[in-house]
Image (tube, rainbow, N blue to C red):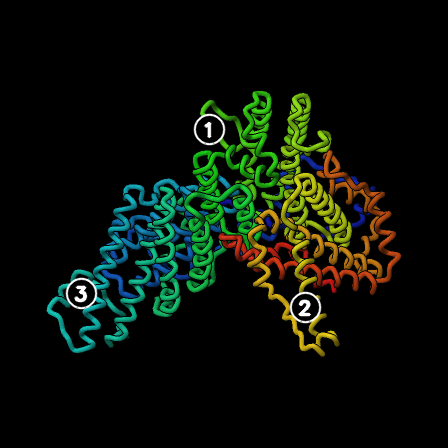
Amino acid sequence: MSRIVLQQEEWVDITPLVSAASEQMGLSQMVRVPTFGLWEAMAALEIMEPRMDNGMAAVHPPSTEKWTVRKAKTIARFSADEIIGVSDMILVKLLSWISGSHLSQTLFSCVLLHEPHACQSHILRPILIGYLKVARRLKGLVELARVAEDDEFFGFLPPGLSLADEVHDNEAVDGLQGVEDALGLELKEARSRMDGNVSAESDATANTLKLEYPESCTQDLERLQFLDAILCRVRFIRSFLSALSYITRRNMGSAKKSLNQSINQLDLCVNSAYLAKDMSIAFDTTVNKKLLSDSPPRAIAEPSTPAAAYSDIRLTLTHILEIVSLPSSGLAWDDTLSFISHFSLRVPQPGVLARSVLVFNCTHAGKLHGKTSYAAALTHSVVSAYPPSAALFASADARVRECVAEFVGLVAGNTGDAGAVEGGAVLERIIVVCGGFNRSLARRNFGKIARELEAIQGGTELIDGALHEHLAKGSLFTSPKPLEEPFYLSSWVYELKLTFLEIYIHMGFELNLYSEFEYHSILWYLDHVYEMHIGHLNRMNTLVARSFPSILELLWQYQQQTDLAREISSSSAGKKKGATSKPISLEAFVAKTVGGVSVRDLNEAVLVARQLIGRAQMLFTFALRRDGYLANPKLDFYSEEVVYNHRFKLFMNMGSPSTQPYTEFKASEAVFLEMSAREMVERGSRFFAEARELLSFLAPFKAKLCASSVTLKDEMEVGGILSLTVCL
């Protein structure tokens, strides 16, 4: 065979040539050659993501010899520190896998997992099988929920490998339970030996376990530490696997119990991580190159240490525990949407596993929480928002029932003769998008849902019009003036659409989609959307004739009572007569008035607080521009109007809320810039103070009304998601 001689290449710097050529090109001109298309251009771009950029922080072949699968099967004994080391490293690889890395390069980099039944250790073998079953359940839940993108979860199973499909969950749990029982007995007898009470069964138990200790471990106390360390890891894996199995079967009560047991073991695992031996020899990070020749090794993201891995898994398990702890009967639609919104907007965002469990739990069997049909959830939500609309849903009139059924079909899906709903239509998609998708994918889909709600709102307005026409003929209106009867059904859809438009704008800040010099225009438009939302709520509250004061009115009453009490106590007449009036405490005021406050009232008040915060931040940005900061870029091709129209293209194509053209924004900007920077900052500070006072007033109401985990702290974090404090 002839030897191939490679031609010597000489590299030449062509930067001056390219720079000179670029100066001869006009604006928007591009150079195109047949050998360099879109694919080559995208491959050449660095997106600074190790898992996507080949060669970036690439995995190099190991410098030390690694075990092969054949070698791993011949290991007769594993010492206690080796078992701990393998177990901890597998957890690290498991978390790396569910963070978006390849399965073959993470979990199956452990050669022991390729043929777990061949492992000769009676303790390590059930651990290996347990982790494989955990991975199988994770894979099933994520794929069932269908909310993960390719860069979030890579579930492809390389040929020839298995996630222990031949072993049933119960068998894996029983195997771990057997090891746990044996370790518990060994631990008990080791303590007896330390106390001088030698048991005759000690040697028999030790022979059954065949557990060896490091050569440096000579004291019984040290052996106890190793036994405790292995025992807590076995319990963790068993409880984790049991929880995932229960979740798959929708036995949330048992899943909650198992998750608590699993979380309780994490501190013990972290505290004993120092006992682990470095078992890198059993993990080959280039194994996928051996399994899949066309898949080059790539950099993987994984926790830096086992302690970090246990911290990450604790956060994931806590999120899942919160989901399975929801009431067994499920939540109403409004409460579900509130819980999902707060859950998904946390920082950092819950992982793909927790989000998959959330969607699986809330959308099971085409029903809300697998319990309530979307039609029933929709009816309850509309009637809760507008109590007079209950007459429409309870009406025996054929035409009214036809209109209501058409509305339910638009929003909640088609209904059958028995009243069952086939899927949840837009309601179910809202849960999937809001609770299941990552931030970037969710924002893109929020725009789609907003456009869908716009179309539904138009159809519902026709339904409301038909209802008005029909009811006017029969004189069935409850109000004196038929024309003032509100459009209940389309108003409900409009409120939902406004909520999503607000979140759509908010998430642009979190995803860093806006440049700093755009902040003032974004916050200005957000303030307009808030104004439309609050105005609509006030208008509907007036038309439905609320019998109880709003939160803002209660706050005013509380302030009046406390001010009056202080005035009486400090007045000269009161001092002469010895009269004192103790101001009513906030707790007492809440206990007195909470009976007339609903969760909807709280949400409306929080919306006002968000507007106050956003308005303060808007004034701060205008103040910065007034003093020469956050100025537009001075580029020939930059157009503020084009950027503005692009940012709010979604809003410009909607019938409601009213659009704000660029000319309207510039007119408002001119008014603000006539003010001094100090004046704008002072006004913004007052808005912040009002928002803080309102949120502090809402806290005890929230604590009494909300049984879920949504807290006032979450509300304040969401309200302040646009924080621009760094600009000050």
Q: Quadrant of the N terminus?
A: top left
Q: How dense is the environment of label 1, judged by Cα within 10 Å: few (below 14), some, or many (20 and up)?
A: some
Q: Quadrant of residue 309?
A: bottom left
Splitting the image into 4 quarters, where does residue 95 fall? bottom left
Residue marked by disc 1: 420
Three-letter amino acid code at the position of disc 2: Ala
Q: Which residue is mark 2?
A: 565
Judging depth in this view, the residue of 511 and 34 nearest the camera is 511
When asked about the image quadrant of residue 31, the answer is top right
Question: Which label is found at residue 206?
Answer: 3
**Of callouts 2 and 1, the N-terminal one:** 1
Residue 725 x, y percent position in the rendering: 70, 63
The residue positioned 49% from the left and 53% from the top of the image is: 707
Q: Which quadrant is home to the C terminus?
A: bottom right
Question: Does the residue at mark 2 contact the one at mark 1 (Cβ under 8 Å)?
Answer: no
**Eyeballing the image, is 410 above or below 342?**
above
| Residue type at tag 3 | Ala
The reply, left or right, for residue 383 in relation to residue 159 is right
The location of residue 180, given as percent across then percent down, is 25, 59
**Looking at the image, do the residues carrying marks 1 and 3 touch, with CB atoms under 8 Å apart?**
no
SS type, badge 3: helix
> Tag 1, which secondary structure?
loop
Cα–Cα span, label 3 and label 2: 76 Å
Element at badge 2? Answer: helix
Of marks 2 and 1, the one in the foreground: 2
**Of callouts 3 and 2, the N-terminal one:** 3
Distance from disc 2 to disc 1, alpha carbons, whole Å, reads 57 Å
Q: Which amino acid type is shown beneath numbered disc 1?
A: Ala
Which residue is nearer to you in this view: 235 or 427?
427
